[in-house]
Amino acid sequence: MNSERNKDRISDLDLPDGSQEEPQIYALRSEGGGWTLSRRGLLGAAAAAAAGCVSSGVSREPPVKWEEVFAHTAPVEALAFTPDGAMLVSGSRDQSVKLWSMPQGSLRKTLQGHTGNVHVLAPSPDGKLLATGSGDKTIRLWSLPEGEFLKTLTKQERELYALAIPPDGRLLASGDQAGTIRLWSLPDGTLLKSIEKQSETVSALAVSPKGGLMASGSLDKTIKLWSLPDGELRKSLNEQKNEVYALAISPDGRLLASGARDGMISLWSLPEGERIHTWKRHEETVTTLAFSPDGLLLASGSWDNSIRLSSIPHGDPVGTVKKHSADVLSVAIDPQGRLLASGSYDKTIKLWSLPDMRLQVCLMDLEATPKKAKGIQYKARNELGEWVSYTQPCGSPIPPGATCVCNCVSGSWGVPAAPTTPRITKPKITEPTITMPRINIPKITTRHYWYPN
């Protein structure tokens, strides 16, 4: 399509009563080679216009600052891809857990039930079970991919801040604010063992992909290595000068990465627990860590609002982005190593391509997004032949073959009412006077229409 011919045009129509109601949403569809206007609600889809949310390879950064759109109504504390990469799971302080289809980014389901902040989550290695931990002192188990509630584990005395499931999927480890680590059997949720070895909050747990080993990090400035499934202490690493907030174990199980309050990242050998290297990549607390599937990259997020990539094992800088407007609380890398997801205190989830760290899209829940947000959204095939949702500023050209699913009119994200059809009354003719047809014009429920060429 010609980009000039297909820019959005909005025509203002005054309401008969002078009021100014919210605009309706329309969609462009390609039918038989021609573009037609159809009326529908905005897709409860994946991506929408947000500050800097532009697909790579299609457009540069937007010329104006866009209104934010949100994935949750509160900070996003936890992210994890399912083992097959088909879903991204998010947990938030709005007490909800959300399932997002990948790579489309569409919201699949919202899981409700927790009565406190959802701090942490862990999908099982077979992708059939999800565990979520909350400030309500409970762990909830859900089926995947359906998202059906299964069971609540209630033996905790304090808030949950860490969860991990070993590769055999038969065990769940949890860490709480009291410094207690608990081991549970799966899928029945029976409590097997309680370990009280940390003097402060257990802030992170990580299990080796090879099995048999678990690491715990705490605000008491220690890292401990445990054998599984017996939960026996192997070694305590007491060389930290600051609180430990994040842990990650490499895919080959040979390296442990830790992130601390002072912005330092450390690399440790496993199972020996010897420190290999330490580097500073952040100005504030390192809150989250994730290895790439090949183990060559480490992603880190921080209270300094940035996401940084470091090479392994030397920690050399690979890339830095700072597109979140508040603390980055969670990062996750998909099993194919092509996408990085980041969750923030700013209530957004952003998807980035790897390793170039180009912003692909912001995930959006219509219920969490302000009605003033504006932008154009379309679906097109990426270089891998997959259908992906892209977002761009209003007025951007739509590439050939793409389907536009959203217009640039701000306002309600809800599905508009069905259109009404003018009712024409047949003329009543009386000789010799002729009465002209009377047309009953329906009430116009909006003052904005979108007329594409």
Image (spheres, helix red, strand yellow):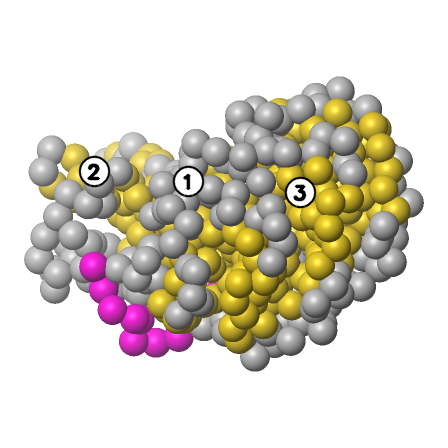
Q: Residues within 10 Å of mark 3 (few under 14, many from 20)?
A: many
- At x 26%, y 59%, the residue is 56
Quadrant occupied by the C terminus: bottom left
Viewer-proximal residue among 324 and 293: 293
On the question of residue 12 being in view, the answer is no
> Alpha-carbon distance for marks 2 and 3?
39 Å
Q: State which mark lies toward you, 2 or 3.
A: 3
Q: Residue at image x 29%, y 76%?
A: 63
The range drawn in magenta is 57-69
N-terminal of the two: label 1 or label 2? 1
- Distance between the alpha carbons at the discs numbered 1 and 2: 18 Å
Secondary structure of residue under mark 3: strand
Amino acid, disc 3: Met
* Residue tagged 1: 335
Q: Helix or strand or loop: what does disc 2 sit on?
A: loop
What amino acid type is highlighted by mark number 1?
Answer: Pro
**Spot occupied by residue 87 in the image (x, y as percentages of width and height):** 47, 37
Image position of 188 with respect to 222: above or below: above
Whether residues under marks 3 and 1 lie with C-beta atoms below 8 angstroms apart, the answer is no
Spot occupied by residue 399 in the image (x, y as percentages of width and height) = 16, 52
Residue nearest the viewer, comparing 126 with 103: 126
Q: Measuring 36% from the left and 41% from the top, which residue is drawn there?
A: 336
Q: Which residue is mark 2?
A: 385
CA neighbours of label 2 inside 10 A, class few (<14), some (14 to 19), many (20+)? few
Q: Which residue is mark 3?
A: 214
Residue 93 x, y percent position in the rendering: 70, 54
Relative height, residue 140 to residue 28 (above, below): above
Which one is in front in this view, the residue at disc 3 or the one at disc 1? 3
